[in-house]
Image (cartoon, rainbow, N blue to C red):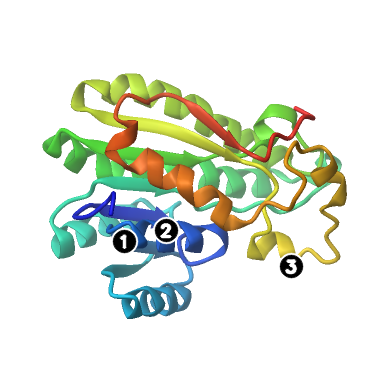
Amino acid sequence: MRLEGKVAIVTGGAQGIGKAYCRGLAREGAKVVIGDIRFDLCKALAGEIEKEGFETLPIKLDVSDEKDTLAMADAALEKFGRIDILVNNAAIYPLCKFTELTYEQWKKVLAVNLDGVFLCTKAVVPQMIRQKRGKIISISTECFFMGYGELVDYTASKAGIVGFSRALAEALGEYNINVNTVTPGLTASENVMTQQPYNFAPHIAGQSIKRRQEPEDLVGTIVFLSSSDSDMITGQIINVDGGYNKH
């Protein structure tokens, strides 16, 4: 197992693609801290993973609340003694026309999607510096490359993640901390699938690989960036979207 003995935190880990990340990291040997605002779902997923023989720690987490993020890091250290991997995955993406987008919604989306990445990263970096090693992986989106008119706030927040990660890679390189960004394409996550009826066909037509992208299609990239195989990769964007050619 490529991550045996490592401790990984996944934000937004109890829902959507985050669940696939948690399962994938656990199956590679990592002890997984599942952070999510839905603590009931955290506990349920933790129970499923533990039935497979892996260790977890469910944490109620609002990534936009600094106290929650600091408590998350403290709890991970208290139980497991180290923090090796942070997957900044938590996000919200309410569809809205720009003409109807309020400042309150704009602030809320950026608070979760961008401030949350900053706060969670800030919470774990001191321990990674002490260890002189760490992996920080933040989830952006292919929307960063093209933009969608009904996701202006979401796209802006996810573009901010790219800039933050590139600068952070330079800031933390001396401590052997790798910082990278993953930009998933349209994925059949729980949230996307609830937007019924959702038609994947036009998007698939623009992909080189002609099938729907599933959450599990992203797990290999997350495991790779979490492992020692990626020790010389930092400040990079890895696009996982089946070769979507409309960028």
Where is residue 155? Give x, y as percent.
Answer: 67, 37
Q: Which residue is mark 1?
A: 32
Q: Is residue 171 left or right of residue 113?
A: left
Residue 118 can be seen, yes or no: no
Residue depicted at 29% across the width and 68% down the height:
57
Where is residue 207? Give x, y as percent.
Answer: 76, 38
What amino acid is at disc 2? Gly
Where is residue 15? Give x, y as percent.
Answer: 53, 65
Where is residue 107? Give x, y as percent.
Answer: 60, 44
What amino acid is at disc 3? Thr
Q: Nearer the viewer, mark 2 or mark 3?
A: 2
Q: Quadrant of residue 240?
A: top right
Q: Quadrant of the C terminus?
A: top right
Q: Say which label, 3 or 1, has the lower sequence index.
A: 1
Is the residue marked by circle 3 packed among few (<14), some (14-19), or many (20+) residues within 10 Å? Answer: few
Q: Quadrant of the N terminus?
A: bottom left
> In the image shown, does 187 or 42 lie closer to the viewer?
187
Q: Which residue is mark 2?
A: 24
Q: Is residue 47 left or right of residue 182?
A: left
Residue depicted at 39% across the width and 39% down the height:
225
Q: Say which label, 2 or 3, has the lower sequence index.
A: 2
Image vertical order of residue 22 relative to residue 2, above or below: below
> In the image shown, does 59 or 178 lie closer to the viewer?
178
Name the secondary structure under disc 3. loop
